[in-house]
Amino acid sequence: MQRATRISINLIFFIQVLLLFLLFFEHRIQLPAWLQVAGRMHPMVLHVPIGILILLFVFMLFRNTFQKKQFRKIMLLCLMLASLSAAVTALFGFFLSIGGDYGVEALQQHKISGVVLSVITFFILVWYQNVKKSEIVFYSAFVFSILVLVLAGHTGSVLTHGENFVLAPVTNKEVGELDVNTASLYRLAVMPVLEKKCFSCHNESKAKGKLIMTSIEKFKRGGENGKVLLEGNSDSSRMIKYIHLPLDDDDHMPPDGKPQLNTFEISLLQAWIQSGANFEKKMSDFADDDTLKKMATTAIGSMIAKEEVKQYTFKAASEDVIKKMNTPFRTAFPIYQNSPALQVDFFVKESFQIGSLEELKEVKDQLVVLNLSKMPVTDVDLTIISQFKNLEKLNLNFTSVKGEGLTNLKSLSQLQSLSLSGTAVSKEALNSILSIPALAEVFIWNTPIKENEKAELEKSFPKIVFIHTLFNDPSKLALSKPILLNEGIIKKGELLQLKHTMPGVAIRYTLDGNNPDSVSSSLYEKPIVVNETVKLKALACKDGWYCSGLLEITCYVEGYKPTQVTLLKPADKQYPGEGAITLTNRLKGFTDVLNEPSWLGFRENAFEAGFTFGSNPPLIKKIVLSYADNLGGYIFPPAEVEVWGGANAKEIKLIKSLKVNQPKSYRSQSMEALAISLEASTYTYYKVVAKPVNKLPLWHGGKGQKGWFFIDEIFFY
């Protein structure tokens, strides 16, 4: 026993020296992988010294119940274990901190408190071995160790859960206390989502990936890999990309084991970033029909509703009845503990029988949530569902419902959420039930309802959020986008060719600017004939897979080439391109690399260029300007375009003038084509004028400043 004690004390002493060394020279240490594994055991072993010190405190309270020698042996053993475990815990903590993403100040406080606890427990152990030493000193040191233990625990909680974690429930202000007229939409709706799902790992104390989200300025700045928010471009924002990664991916956020974002929260974040990720814009500054405002209103209402659990007045179903509702293909359970409200989920499409739906009449008063996703339910079966008068949430995704029977659901006055994704329901059929007073959200992705129809629904029913975006289901995979085989500018007579790497995939496409759907859009069966510049949008679909993301490409077809091109006003000195030849050299630019020779940039001057077609001019019916749309870079569509025509530069007249619609909010950067239709003419000379935006709009970060106009090609048809 004495030999074991001596070895243990020497080992603990060695660790104390090592801890002090690490405290001063940790930044010079490169940790091997096996010690990194030991570091990750820190959260597991840290509970051991806590438990032993508490046990020691209990022993001291009841010391009179033990014989003196027995008590001393127990105390020595417990002190040795407490000191050893405190030393090992502190050492593992150092290993974990090396290369970790933690706030410097809080991490240093936690390190020092851990080392002090290790040293003080070792001091108590050595002191207690000498019987002649004063007990007052011993007990004083022990009380001090408990205080240090509390401090170490507190600083540790700050690292793992953020500042003020313990007192947050009684000190945080509730969302309901904020004034909608003065508070920003970010503070009211977006920040609560981030606070709940992101702030614990991205704060001043613990900054994973060196990203701090609790400070707006640091949030905008981003982390070790740069910005996580690309204003106006949610699809390319790293934050959204990481959210959509598979759960087992190391970069998935929030990490596996942490509370995950639900589909509505993801949709809210995407809409906020797409609108420009404005941290200051007030709720009252958004238009009532703005999609983001409607989603934010829903989110705020949901947060307020969750402050207290809804109380239901109907009686609970008996345990026997609930037990009867549970089969291998159907489950019934309370929506929360001791609640009379029930949720029922159906499984296995092949085993579904309409009788199993009719059996739910026994719990028709208690049924609040019904999930029939992927079941062969038809419009006729909706008459059964209409009897569940307290139903609040109904999932009919990928069922055989077409819409004729939706009117049966009008009697469900409590219905708040309806999911119809993957069905054949049309806008007209959906209209019949949107007057349900409680209805707040409708999921309509992968239905025949087009984007413009969704916009009409939003305008007619501003209190309802229509989710038209495809969300990931971990049980299914999404197809990759179709591939356009044509490269660069398409020659006259060349056909557009699409393909997909997976056999059996159906490609749906449009050429009119509308988004294709998986049901009614044109099916790609052979190469597509195009005679002029078009906006191609295509997606790939296949049974058992999610449809792909949208392939969106402006396909430029070569037109009549002028014999001479002249820049009548110079481009900006920073973006001169290759002069006038830039406009007809058939070299396309990239919207994120604007200082290459393919682009001409204009800001102070309007774009003005002359085009000569010689003695035998072609019949011109349309002119297309290819320009960059990069709102984050102050690059806008032209404010106004003029086309002049005549025999030469001195003998011309205005033949077309048009104002160009300007964006209302941020959007993804893209290459755009502005088509200008003309009365058929055979002028030998054309002058084209495009005026940059004189003042950027109020919603833009550079409001009041001049906008840029970037052009790379002009086509005549």
Image (cartoon, rainbow, N blue to C red):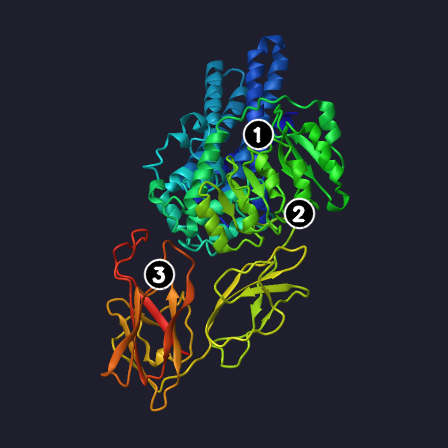
- Mark 2 or 1: the one toward you: 2
Q: Secondary structure at mark 3?
A: loop
**Which residue is denoted by mark 3 in the rendering?**
661
Q: Position of 115 compared to 368: left or right?
A: left
* Front-most of residues 323 and 413: 413
Q: Farthest residue in the top direction?
A: 64
Q: Position of 5 compared to 512: left or right?
A: right
In x, y percent, where is residue 527?
A: 59, 74
**Which residue is denoted by mark 1 in the rendering?**
47
Sooner in the amino-acid sequence: mark 3 or mark 2: 2
In x, y percent, where is residue 473?
A: 61, 48
Q: Residues within 10 Å of mark 3 (few under 14, many from 20)?
A: few
Q: Name the residue rendered at 26%, 85% in the picture.
A: 648
- Mark 1 or 3: the one toward you: 3
In x, y percent, where is residue 560?
A: 41, 83
Q: Secondary structure at mark 1?
A: helix
- Kindly report the distance in space between the C-alpha atoms of the residues bearing marks 1 and 3: 63 Å
* Front-most of residues 156 and 589: 589
**Which residue is denoted by mark 2 in the rendering?**
399
Q: Name the residue rendered at 67%, 46% in the picture.
A: 374
Sooner in the amino-acid sequence: mark 2 or mark 1: 1
Image quarter (top left, top right, bottom left or bottom right) of the N terminus: top right
* Front-most of residues 336 and 648: 648
